Amino acid sequence: MSCLKNKKILLGVTGGIAAYKSAVLLRGLLKEGAEVRVVMTEAARSFVTPLTFQALSGHPVHTELLDPEQESAMDHISLARWAELVLVAPATANFMAKLASGQADDLLTTLCLATTAPISIAPAMNHQMWLNRATQENLEKLLSRGVVCWGPAEGDQACGENGPGRMVEPELLQQQVQQFFTQGALSGVRVLMTAGSTREPIDPVRFIGNRSSGKMGYALAEALSEQGAEVTLVSGPVTVSPPVGITRIDVEQAEEMRQEVINRVAQADIFIGVAAVADYRPSQVADEKIKKDRQLVTLELVKNPDILAEVASLDGAPFCVGFAAETENVEAYAEAKRQAKGLDLIAANQVAAKEGGFESDQNALLLLWQGGREVLPMMSKYQLAKQLVERISEQYHASRQELVNTE
Ligand code: PMT
């Protein structure tokens, strides 16, 4: 039976060109057996008529805050109480701003204030509007209040520009809704993680970096999110697209990565370090591009903070998982790292082999924890991530149980 069977979903549609895709989303949700009621803002009705949603859902579309006809059937408070999930797709910048400031000047914003159901938004707007500080601050506010943000996706936009701001495709949004209603092994568990490489600047155009593509970390973020975890990913520069449903914080340097992690670690149940953090950075960063006229250039390097070791040594540290990138003596070096950094589990990979490791779509891992060991053979990073998540989940729950038993 579909996990959406009889689930009560209130679909809010605001005024963006992506509104037509919400009709596809509605069909998909209904097909899975969900009960859906649609609320449209005035601007949404400029893009798609309520009749489209009414015909698809078989129910009148709610448009007015004070509509005598609707009020007698299902007023805005009943609708707010009825919903098990409020999904606003597309969510415009204006809607996000209103939601963040607690306005209630139309049916949808009023419902959002009145409901106790979880609220999720699928933003859709021009990429500059998305990146604008005002929108980002509104997003931060909404996330801190527990609003779940699915997307936006990156790519070509209706305005002819390219960047982050497209509404996530209806099929992917439907998957998110299904995941939301599925009780995964890590349901409600807050995971903070790092992925990708860091870039340590030498001058305005050059940096010290490494070959991490982010593929392993992003696959892991996706697998964690599929098990219901609330994932915050602090990411170095990568080219892979982030999975829908996670919160991504972009950084460049190890110091920035550390700061973003430390700012959030108190709210994390699990911390996972997948990033290939540069161990050293230049002690001086040249203000201007270094000229090529010298035969020999000497760079002085200073050690970067070890983010994982710092997190693991905190009072009340989360369950800590590290990765070990090794080229020889994989097991011995990885176990030494696990013990030195005080980790609950370490996932070691051979990064000098023909297959797997950096940049590859495949990988193999050796998992080590106190009193346990498991070999995960070569497979796609996504499949590998799914198996790793099983082990992390099992060990995490066992460690929590142990805590309860010793209290
Ligand atoms: O991104 P891909 O191309 O898919 O490649 C995946 C990967 C090979 C990068 C990944 O599987 C991996 O091994 N990541 C860890 C890389 C690494 O830096 O390993 P390490 O052995 O140097 O570090 C040990 C652990 O300490 C890691 O969890 C690392 O995130 C953490 N660390 C290291 C240094 C530092 N200053 N701060 C840290 O937090």
Image (cartoon, rainbow, N blue to C red):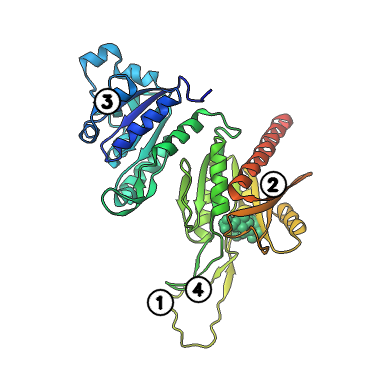
Percent coordinates x, y for residue 55 in the rendering: 29, 23
Rounded to the nearest angstrom, the CA distance separating label 3 from label 4 is 56 Å
Percent coordinates x, y for residue 280 in the rendering: 58, 67
Give the mark nearer the N terminus: 3 vs 4.
Answer: 3
| Within-10-Å neighbours for mark 4: few <14, some 14–19, many 20+ | few
Left or right: residue 237 compared with residue 115 = right
Q: Amino acid at mark 1?
A: Glu
In this rendered view, identify the residue nearer to me: 398 or 125.
Answer: 125
Q: Is residue 265 visible?
A: no
User: Can you identify the residue that label 2 sits on?
Assistant: 345
Percent coordinates x, y for residue 229 in the rendering: 55, 37
Percent coordinates x, y for residue 134 in the rendering: 31, 47
Rounded to the nearest angstrom, the CA distance separating label 2 from label 1 is 43 Å
Left or right: residue 387 compared with residue 64 = right
The disc label shown at residue 288, or none = 1
User: Can you identify the residue that label 4 sits on?
Assistant: 284
Q: Amino acid at mark 2?
A: Leu
* Foreground disc of the pair 3, 4: 3
